[in-house]
Amino acid sequence: MGEFDLIRRYFQRPVRRAVLGVGDDCALLAPAAGMQLAISSDMLVQGRHFFADVNPRLLGHKALAVNLSDLAASGARPLAFTLALSLPQADEAWISDFSQGLLALADAHECELIGGDTTGGPLNICITVFGEVPAGQALLRSGARAGDEIWVSGQLGDARLALEALLGKITLPPELLAQTRQRLEAPTPRVALGLALRGLASSALDVSDGLLGDLGHILELSGVGATVDSRLTTPLIAASVNPLWATSQFGLDLQQQCTLAGGDDYELCFTAPAQRHAEVLAAGLASGTAVSCIGRIDAKPGLRLLGADGQAMQPLWQSFDHFGVN
Amino acid sequence: MGEFDLIRRYFQRPVRRAVLGVGDDCALLAPAAGMQLAISSDMLVQGRHFFADVNPRLLGHKALAVNLSDLAASGARPLAFTLALSLPQADEAWISDFSQGLLALADAHECELIGGDTTGGPLNICITVFGEVPAGQALLRSGARAGDEIWVSGQLGDARLALEALLGKITLPPELLAQTRQRLEAPTPRVALGLALRGLASSALDVSDGLLGDLGHILELSGVGATVDSRLTTPLIAASVNPLWATSQFGLDLQQQCTLAGGDDYELCFTAPAQRHAEVLAAGLASGTAVSCIGRIDAKPGLRLLGADGQAMQPLWQSFDHFGVN
């Protein structure tokens, strides 16, 4: 099947929200009056962001999910996206599954595929996503103020735990592996929470490279510091922990490190004034998303981490860097 | 150098036209009142769209040029773009040269880099570009009407000629190779012409996969046919033709096939009512771009090609398909 047939069969659908969709030189999008367009782009590469044998349906989901997560972090409502896809061969079954996973998540968020590109080459998926947000209301990384509380959504570390297991570094009980693998391969973008945090959160971002490193971006851009109490980060591994590895060289350190610096979480980390604590809890409830307060913004620069004993501690891993060592 | 330092050093610059640029989860863009956003995305893969040893400065230029060419074909004025880049290693000299070529063309078109992604992986460049066009004035592929004239900008076939030489299939005299190679590696997006054609052209697209195949998209979406007179396509190879290969198996056929189906031209092919012939010529003059009338739109479906003798002929090559044979 040729490039154009491929696009037509799996990716071209009638236009709903855009002015013009797939099939011309450009798509046309018209944000509503008073709205700004929030734009983000993420590239997923085989062997770096996913395994060669990943389920293509899950990969389609994840490729869009990580982009929707950026919209969520900006408090933007999804509108549309473009898909550029480099494929080693035109494997129709694979493409069909990939498009189903992709478009199911797109439909769930009323986010329309409006254009893109396909080519031959090593497997690479690049999505650029568009959302809208009322002018001046986007959540930024730069708005944290001393005294604000620091929050995270959902549960951190699951994805990294699954990754360690899939890489053969640890062994997980099957049920825990299935559960964490789902979080690695099909993360849930926190779009509803992002919308509920408009006008409430003072800063926000999505945790893709690990909590501490990503929180560092908020601190840097806001010109503040922070104290994070690792005892308040959501417990990652419940009673189901396999005693074999809980007592291994990884042990409790692994739990802590996955939570604080694991990466691939696609949860939101955000700050809000302490006096609005109850409103944040209500926003979590209203959006069906668990939220946990894990620390506080300080005027003093730097990121301080309190360990199990309430004393300052050093995390073992650094944040994920795509040109770094891990 | 890590990912974030890399972005900061080579790709992060003060925001000028966007509301928010590189460095947050999303960039923010606000089209002016009454404007629609034209969006296009192109992915360039090593070994498929460029050679591994291509000059990175030219590659930076071309990666943006092919995207600006899509804006030109829509009659949109460039505003901004995102860049997603997968690199085998963080080669700082390469990145520096690439960014210079990229940003020089961006500056020439006042098109701002507002966000993106970098990762490790096989070399892959994905740019999504944003332009603005007054609501309802975008040039589409679907507007050609019987009786319209068919036009192309500039000169077709140069890029393919250079490619054939670089692949060792033909030998070109050094001067001609240098000239055509420049067209292959650093195409000129016809942005000014696209703007001048607003309200004048009835349809338009950019020629990236070869004239006849791309014109076919206009015919299909407009529900019309066409007659193209190959004698009117701009002569590609002047008196400088190397007699060695002019008489080879490629010979005159090569000239014709490069022109009609070569690909990678990034010229505009467009239609306009015949009675506006002089206005099209004036638009070409005003935008400093050569334009040639090469045929006419017919009510009868199908694409008819007239050869050197004025009789119907069949082109030897088909249009470029990224999953096809060439």
Image (tube, coloured by chain):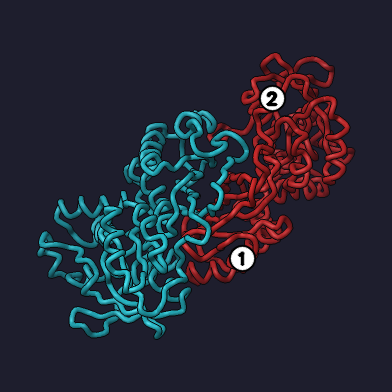
Chain colours: A red, B cyan
- Decide which of tag 2 and tag 1 comes sooner along the chain: 1
Residue A15, labelled with which disc?
A: 1
Please indicate whether residue A316 sits to the left or right of residue B20 in the image: right
Image position of B241 with respect to A39: above or below:
below
Secondary structure beneath disc 1? Answer: loop
- C-alpha gap between disc 2 and disc 1: 49 Å
Percent position (x, y) of residue B261? 32, 69
Indicate the amino acid at tag 1.
Answer: Val
Indicate the amino acid at tag 2.
Answer: Leu
Please indicate whether residue B176 sits to the left or right of residue A189 in the image: left
Image position of A151 with respect to B175: above or below:
above
Secondary structure beneath disc 2? Answer: loop
Mark 1, Cα crowd under 10 Å, few <14 / some 14-19 / many 20+, is few
Residue corresponding to mark 2: A316
Residue at the image position 14 percent from the left and 67 percent from the top: B246
Residue at the image position 42 percent from the left and 80 percent from the top: B224
